[in-house]
Image (cartoon, grey):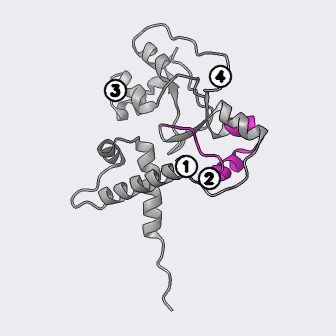
Amino acid sequence: MIRAGRDVVDRLQIAALADMSPSVAAKRKPWNATGHPAPITTYRPTNGRPQMWDKEQAEAFAAGQPVPQLPDQDSPDDLLDRFEAAELAGMTPVAWESAYHQGRFPSDDDRLGVPMWHRRTVEAIRDNPPAFKKPKGPTGNRQRRSQELEQRIRELLHEPGPRLSDPDIAQRLGVHVNTVFKHRTRIEAAEQAPAPASE
């Protein structure tokens, strides 16, 4: 959960706060140092779903200052991940994810490539589940932007010269590396799919 008004960092950003390269941080794991604040995510980290820490807490630890406590009062503006949202709504994470991809539960925010929902949104869904309808308005705009971003990533992947890495593409486009990873995986899967047999 990301408490209202807070921001987050991932392992790459913690490495930067500790003045370590990503490769050195992968060995030393500064996020496991004694006294380091605990992650605010409860799920197991995977590609496209990174572990997150409260930014203010991580910065304080890196500066050798006392780590501030997180707010302990729930707020309508708290941001929940799909596991937390599903639990609050009384659903399984799989059912929540399916409804999200169908356009029934559009996310309110995106942190480090991970879709998030405000507590008030989840409570409204729990109390009055929306009927399925074709996405439109802001949701449709998000889908269009996602499609446009995927096209830009596809173009960069096919640029002449050495193949760009995910961090290179993320820097060029001003997006998070996990966002690039998700789109690149989908692009490569589509390009590797066998062509339909001709009659």
Where does label 4 land, which residue?
75
CB under 8 Å between discs 2 and 1: yes
Q: Residue at x 57, y 38 (%)?
A: 108
Q: Position of residue 111 (x, y in %)?
A: 50, 35
Q: Earlier in the sequence, mark 3 or mark 4?
A: 3
Decide if residue 193 is in sight here: yes
Q: Nearer the viewer, residue 70 or 89?
A: 89
The quadrant in which residue 120 appears is top right
Tag 2 secondary structure = loop
The magenta region covers 84-111
Q: Is residue 50 above or below residue 35?
A: below
Q: Which mark is residue 103?
A: 2
Closer mark to the observer between disc 3 and disc 4: 4
Closer mark to the observer between disc 3 and disc 1: 1
Q: Residue at x 34, y 55 (%)?
A: 152
CB under 8 Å between discs 3 and 1: no
How far is the residue under mark 3 from the one under mark 4?
A: 35 Å
Three-letter residue code for mark 3: Met
Please, which residue is most extreme toward the bottom here? Answer: 199
Number of residues whose C-alpha sits closer than 10 Å to that of mark 2, classed few (under 14), some (14–19) or many (20 or more): some
Where does label 3 land, which residue?
20
Q: Position of residue 53 (x, y in %)?
A: 51, 26
Q: Which mark is residue 139?
A: 1
Tag 1 secondary structure = helix
Decide if residue 87 is in sight here: no
Three-letter residue code for mark 1: Thr
Tag 3 secondary structure = loop
Locate residue 141 relative to residue 75 in the image: left or right.
left
